[in-house]
Amino acid sequence: MEDSAPSLIADVSRLMRRAFDERARTIGVTRQQWQMLTYLARNEGINQGGLAYLMEVEPITLCRMVDRLQDSDLVERRSDPADRRAWQLFLTERGRARLDDLRPLAAGLYDEAMAGINEKEQVAMIAALKAMRTNLSRRALPPQEAANG
């Protein structure tokens, strides 16, 4: 029986996560922490509820993750001037430096995964994956509660 596209996507994703975990551990970061730092770099000032939604974790789980990253001086919470109940999240200089350490690890893993796949095939694959993401992203809008946090 041939592998289906969804099965192959899931396998590649799992294998890449596992390989990245192994590499990131060498500098003392988990994949989830790397993911959070990356989301924050793209969305500085986002509140905790919005970040929990993006990362697909429960707000309480995200709160614990932020606590750990704040204790490590990688992330800082600032009160949201528009909502006294909410915290906005920002990377610290140390958090930016940690991301700089992680980028070569991610790039090396990407190069390893793409070995033997020519540039034309890579471009076509990326275009197809973007189209799939767009198709699936249209299905659901973020819940209203993600605006708080």
Image (cartoon, rainbow, N blue to C red):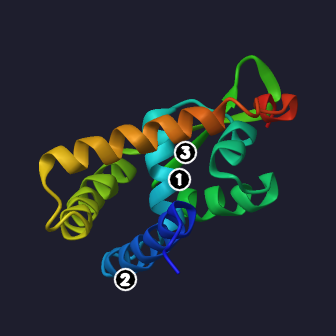
Q: Amino acid at mark 1?
A: Met
Q: Amino acid at mark 3?
A: Glu
Q: CA distance from mark 1 to mark 2?
A: 17 Å
Q: Estimate the x, y position of residue 60 in percent, counting from the top left.
A: 81, 58
Q: Is residue 75 left or right of residue 146?
A: left
Q: CA distance from mark 3 to mark 1?
A: 13 Å
For the C terminus, which image quadrant?
Answer: top right
Q: Estimate the x, y position of residue 140 in percent, counting from the top left.
A: 76, 34
For residue 148, which quarter of the picture? top right
Secondary structure at badge 1 equals: helix
Taking 63 as reference, is 120 above or below it?
above
Q: Nearer the viewer, residue 31 or 137?
A: 137
Q: Is residue 115 left or right of residue 147?
A: left
For residue 88, which quarter of the picture? top right
| Residue 83 numbered tag | none
Q: CA distance from mark 2 to mark 3?
A: 27 Å
Secondary structure at badge 3 equals: strand
In the image as oriented, which residue stretches furthest toward the top?
Answer: 82
Identify the residue under disc 3. Answer: 76
| Residue 36 numbered tag | 1
- Give the residue at x 39% y 52%: 95
Taking 75 as reference, is 140 above or below it?
above
